[in-house]
Every structure is written in structure tokens, then in C-alpha cells.
Amino acid sequence: MLAQHSLQAQKPGQVIDQVVAVVGSNVIMQSEIEMEFRQIDKEFEGDLPDTMRCAILQQKIQDYILLTKAQLDYVPANEVMGEAELEKRIRYFARQFP
């Protein structure tokens, strides 16, 4: 037997989802926080305090700060520099072990 799901029309002014934080070009949505909160609640089979939502948001913000910083600090190594370094190391080891 197939389960039937009823769809209800959205009420005017009802919030479906919202942005709770923006870090760099990354957006954190309320639905992400709620989904993670429900998952943790299931894993621990207990009532979690509402402060857990705040902790989840703080962790997501910290993760995105680190990601944004890593993206800013990223310096692509070009192929020429890589080959030159490889040649340098080959010569070094060739001198060490003739």
C-alpha cells in the first residue's frame, strides 16, 4: 500500500527557510541548522537544549571561516615551479647516492 502525503498551500507570510549567516561567499540556511539538530537528536535519543542550535551554527561559521581563509591563502603552484623543484631534488639525491 502506498503512503499518501497531503500537500498544504503555504500561508501568506509564512517563512519556509531563511539565511542565518553569510561567511565569505557561503550561506548558512536555517534549514541546515534544523536538519543537523534533528540528526543529533536522533543519535542521542534525547531532548537536546535549544542552545545546541547555537552550537551547530557556531561550528558551521567556524568551518566556513577556515574554508574562506584557505581559499584566500591558496597559491596555485604552476607546472614550471613544480618541475624545477623536482629537478633540484633529483640532483640533490644523485649527489648523495652516486
Image (tube, rainbow, N blue to C red):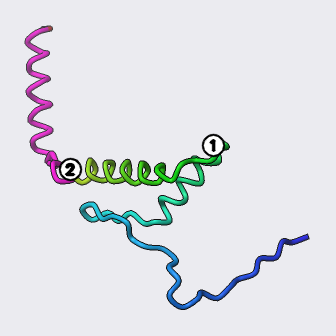
Judged by depth in the image, the label closer to the viewer, 1 or 2, is 1
Q: Which residue is at the front of the view, 69 or 6?
A: 6
Between marks 1 and 2, how big is the CA–CA gap? 32 Å
* Rendered location of residue 76, percent (x, y): 16, 49
What kind of secondary structure does the magenta stretch mostly adopt?
Answer: helix
Rendered location of residue 43, percent (x, y) = 63, 43
Q: What is the three-letter code of the residue carrying label 1?
A: Glu
Residue 20 vertical position relative to residue 41 in the rendered view, above or below: below
Q: Is residue 61 magenta?
A: no
Q: Amino acid at mark 2?
A: Lys
Judging by the rendered image, the residue that carries numbered circle 1 is 43
Badge 1 crowding class, 10 Å Cα cut-off, few under 14, some 14 to 19, many 20 or more, is: few
| Badge 2 element | helix
84 lies above or below 23: above
93, 55: nearer the viewer: 55
Residue at the image position 68 percent from the left and 85 percent from the top: 8
Figure disc tally: 2
Q: Is residue 55 left or right of residue 36?
A: left
98, 37: nearer the viewer: 37
Q: Furthest-right residue in view?
A: 1
Farthest residue in the bottom direction? 12
Badge 1 vs badge 2, beta-carbon distance below 8 Å: no
Q: Secondary structure at mark 1?
A: helix
Would residue 45 be found to the left or right of residue 82 on screen? right
Q: Earlier in the sequence, mark 1 or mark 2?
A: 1
Residue beneath the point at 52% across and 77% down = 16
The magenta-colored residue range is 70-96
Q: Is residue 19 above or below residue 76?
A: below
- Front residue of 44 and 70: 44
Pointer 2: residues within 10 angstroms few (<14), some, or many (20+)? few
Q: Which mark is residue 69?
A: 2
